[in-house]
Image (cartoon, rainbow, N blue to C red):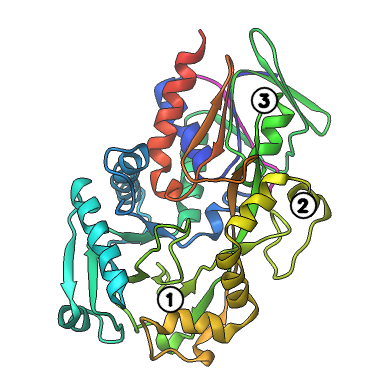
Amino acid sequence: MRFDYCVIGAGIVGLASANKILEANPGASLLLLDKEERVAVHQTGHNSGVIHAGIYYEPGSLKAKLCRAGAEMTRAFCTEHQIPFEQCGKLIVATNAKEVARIDALYARAAANGLAITRLERAELREREPQITGIAALLSPETGIVDYTRVCEKLAETARSAGAEIRFGVAVEHIKEGPDSVEIGAAGNLWTASRLVVCAGLQSDRLARLAGLDIDFRIVPFRGEYFRLRPEKSEIIRHLIYPAPDPELPFLGIHLTRMIDGSVTVGPNAVLGLAREGYAKFSIDASDAWNIASFPGFWKLIFANRKHALHELKGSLSKRAYLEECRKYCPSLELEDLLPYQAGIRAQIVTSDGKAFHDFLIKETDRMLHVCNAPSPAATSALPIGQMIAEKVTAQVA
């Protein structure tokens, strides 16, 4: 069967892309495929649920522009479809002089991005958050929280209403680009589409190679391990609480996050995963583990970041060490406050020279567009990313 468009991946980027393609091309036929049985099974359904404001990104960069536009579009989408969200604000807390210098640099960056942001001194921080200890902080009132799985469920509904055919439980095994169409095969089924969009997240490198793209990177999975606070501690914070980030590291550090259901999570850390989709601790997938171990770029990355990797591993193996990271800014927390919570897995692109790639990466051919990397704030930015993808594939070929 032939379609005008095929989208692979029912995470938030794939669903947003399907919606924006159909908005731009009313009446077009579109097939959306996913190997799971429902939307948002992997990265989208395992994140912190934060609507980011765009504090951390280089002024004028694509990340900064997409994040700011995405926050506004996400709030508007949730309002239109009656999806609960809250603009609770975020505090980035400095606990020593080095961290004060970091948040001062962030303050200048946020101001250059046109964000409403306030610098707080110790007393002002304590007034807003009595349980949080710090010598200074930044307040981002535009940061919010939402359940992105609910957003995805509504995006699937709106895509179907616009004419999309969505098929779950379909693991793509064959992609072949021809002069006027792309063949997509799975489990004995064969479809053709004038244009193909691949938003495969943790499997993006594999589907890129399946489609014949020449790539020099691999996805290395990093587990983000979380706890949740016991219910009696759910009122411990009013805002999201983040540590001052180390600019030399790709992750933001362990933070306290209010969730839209009223609970509070603690995390994530960032430790190597040996299974791209293994969420239980110590999960191993032989194929995924070999894919990592046989890639020289991985060993270069680990050697260059060995000190940080060992620090993160210590926190993963020791709940007490994990707690100490939180107690730097929330000293009232105790071991019994940390209850089990689901882990997330981040699809980290690592290049053959051992570099971790942190920006959006899209590969295009005449009739295909592959979203190879969509790091945070991809969930926040999904709707404008989808709009950008829709413009690209509409312009590819007639």
Foreground residue, 12 or 162? 12
Residue 171 lies left or right of residue 4; in this view the side is: right
Disc sitting over residue 293 in the figure: 2
Q: Which amino acid does label 2 sit on?
A: Ala
* First in sequence: mark 1 vs mark 3: 3
Residue that label 3 marks: 213
Residue that label 1 marks: 264
Q: Report the residue at 56% width, 87% height from top.
A: 320
Which percent across, then down, holds residue 157? Answer: 50, 42
User: Is 387 one of the magenta-colored residues?
Assistant: no
Say which quarter of the image contains residue 179: top right
Which percent across, then down, holds residue 101? Answer: 26, 65
Q: Which amino acid does label 3 sit on?
A: Leu
Q: Report the residue at 47% width, 30% height from top.
A: 162
Local secondary structure at mark 2: helix
Say which quarter of the image contains residue 339: bottom right
Q: Report the residue at 68% width, 48% height from top.
A: 36
* First in sequence: mark 1 vs mark 2: 1
**Camera-nearest label, 1 or 3:** 3
- Between the C-alphas of marks 2 and 3, the distance is 22 Å
Foreground residue, 20 or 113? 113
Q: Do the residues labelled 1 and 2 touch (CB within 8 Å)?
A: no
Q: Is residue 367 above or below residue 152?
A: above
**Camera-nearest label, 2 or 3:** 2
Foreground residue, 362 or 72? 362
Residues shaded magenta: 28-36
Residue 270 lies left or right of residue 21; in this view the side is: right
Which percent across, then down, holds residue 33? Answer: 65, 36
Residue 370 lies left or right of residue 189; in this view the side is: left
Local secondary structure at mark 1: strand
Q: Report the residue at 30% width, 86% height from top.
A: 131
